[in-house]
Amino acid sequence: QAESESPSARANEEVVVTEVLPAATEDIPRAVPPLEPVVQQEIASSSVGKVEGSVAPAEPVAPTLETPATRSATRIAPEQQSPIPSGARDAAWLKQQSASAYTIQLVSLSSEERVASYLAQQRDRSQFAWYPIVRGGKRLYVVTYGQFDSKAAADAAAASLPGEVGKVEPWVRPLKLVQEAIAAGT
């Protein structure tokens, strides 16, 4: 009888599962290799399972079956896609533009989500670009509007921005400086 055994004798038992029941493998696709016997580690005589001087019997451990479904569920998720709406341009695009051109800086925002929300309100997203920078140890996201061949053309556009850009203080900037900020901020 198990009740007549001393608690220390029961605590030092090694529990080994030597076979897996066929019912546990019926739903596994054939591509998954057969299961190996599952060995539970030795139960230590320390405080594991002790309750007021007695040792509780070990709970049976069900083997974990890896299936294609569980395999994909346990993978580390790939880096999430950017929340930025399609059509808006990014830092890579800005770096490829002529350094002699100009753009209009509209806003600096604290997160990509805020950039996404701002850009989602714009009708012609192809006129907008965004890029990350670091200022004072904080990451910010700058949104720009347009690409202009001259400062005069950028100034004229800044004076007549579409209403959906909101109340901003437009800042005409040479793309060369924007490209330098991108290089320094990433």
Image (tube, helix red, strand yellow):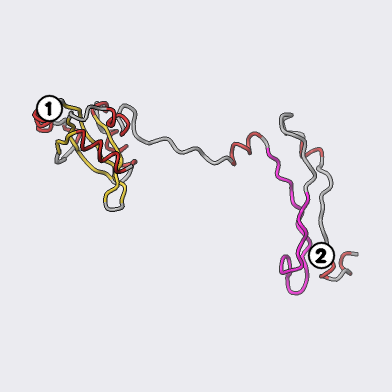
Q: Position of residue 50 (x, y in %)?
A: 74, 69
Disc 2 versus disc 1: nearer the observer: 1
Magenta-drawn stretch, dominant element (helix, strand or loop): loop
**Mark 2 or mark 1, which has the lower sequence index?**
2
Q: Nearer the viewer, residue 181 or 46?
A: 181
Q: Which residue is mark 2?
A: 12
- x, y percent for residue 151: 11, 30
- Mark 1 residue type: Ser
Q: Give the labeled residue for mark 1.
A: 150
- Numbered disc 1: secondary structure: loop
Q: Quadrant of the N terminus?
A: bottom right
Q: Relative to 152, is 138 on the left or the right?
A: right
x and y, in percent, of residue 39 in the image: 78, 50
- On screen, residue 183 versus residue 175, left or right, reads right
Q: Farthest bottom residue?
A: 53
The residue depicted at 42 percent of the width and 35 percent of the height is: 81
Residue located at (77% from left, 53% from top): 40
Q: Distance between the Cα atoms at labels 2 and 1?
A: 83 Å
Query: Is residue 12 magenta-colored?
Result: no
Q: Amino acid at mark 2?
A: Asn
Viewport quadrant of the C terminus: top left
**Magenta-drawn segment:** 39-66
